[in-house]
Image (spheres, helix red, strand yellow):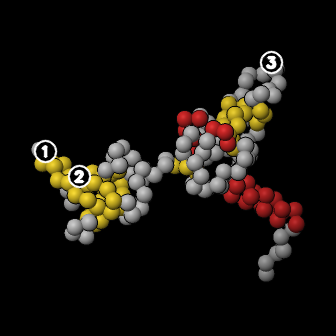
Amino acid sequence: MAMPISCSAFSRAALALALVACGMPAFAQDSANQIVSNQPAGEVVLIPNRVIYPGETIELAALKQVTLIPGKHRPDAVATRSEELQGKIAKRTLLPGRYIPSAAVREAWLVEQGAAVQVFFVAGGLTITATAVTLQPGSAGDFIKVRNSDSGKILSGTVMADGTIQVGAS
């Protein structure tokens, strides 16, 4: 027979679940309001100062620089520098006052799904070009699938910085 869960145990479990689902709060103080003390200075991190929604481009105006309270250390795999966040796209909702996990942001798409692109195959001195339609969006360096406009054949290739797709031999 199952034993009933006490209210306090249920509350602790709900709190733990909420912290895991929403991200850990950043134990920090505003850099502008930093209190001078004899303790070593804490790490500086960036946190949202407002809700950032999935698909939204992250701008520096939406971030706040804070200094972690001495003795508190940031978790691994969280974004801390403006270069890691500026112009990136939020993959999920980012809440104010919470750390920003590196996995919660992505590069902006260089090619959108359904866009017409040039596809290149290069082998030695041979270069073959064709027009294709992207079957998925991608950033520079992403491996995506495209459909050849003439033959209908599906190819996989790497998105290049100029928005073209380079395919290899299959």
Question: Mark 2 touching mark 3, by CB under 8 A?
Answer: no
Ranked by sequence position, the earlier of labels 2 and 3 is 3
Q: Amino acid under label 3?
A: Asn
Considering depth in this image, is 140 or 2 the residue closer to the camera?
A: 140
- Residue visible at 54% across and 35% down? 83
Image quadrant where one finds the N terminus: bottom right
Q: Compute the Cα span from label 2 to label 3.
A: 61 Å
Q: Amino acid under label 1?
A: Gly
Is 151 above or below relative to 102? below
Q: Position of residue 169 (x, y in %)?
A: 20, 56
Closer to us: mark 2 or mark 3? Answer: 2
* Residue indicated by mark 2: 120
Q: Amino acid under label 2?
A: Phe
* Residue indicated by mark 1: 124
Mark 1: give few (<14), some (14-19) or many (20+) Cα within 10 Å: few
Which circle marks residue 38 in the picture?
A: 3
Mark 3: give few (<14), some (14-19) or many (20+) Cα within 10 Å: few
Ranked by sequence position, the earlier of labels 1 and 3 is 3
Q: Compute the Cα span from label 1 to label 3.
A: 64 Å
Q: Position of residue 145 (x, y in %)?
A: 34, 61
Closer to us: mark 1 or mark 3? Answer: 1
Element class at badge 3:
loop
The answer to whether residue 110 is left or right of residue 69 is: left
Element class at badge 1:
loop
Question: Mark 1 touching mark 2, by CB under 8 A?
Answer: no
Task: Look at the image and tell me whether residue 63 can be seen.
Answer: yes
Based on the displayed image, in which of its 4 quarters is residue 102 positioned?
A: top right
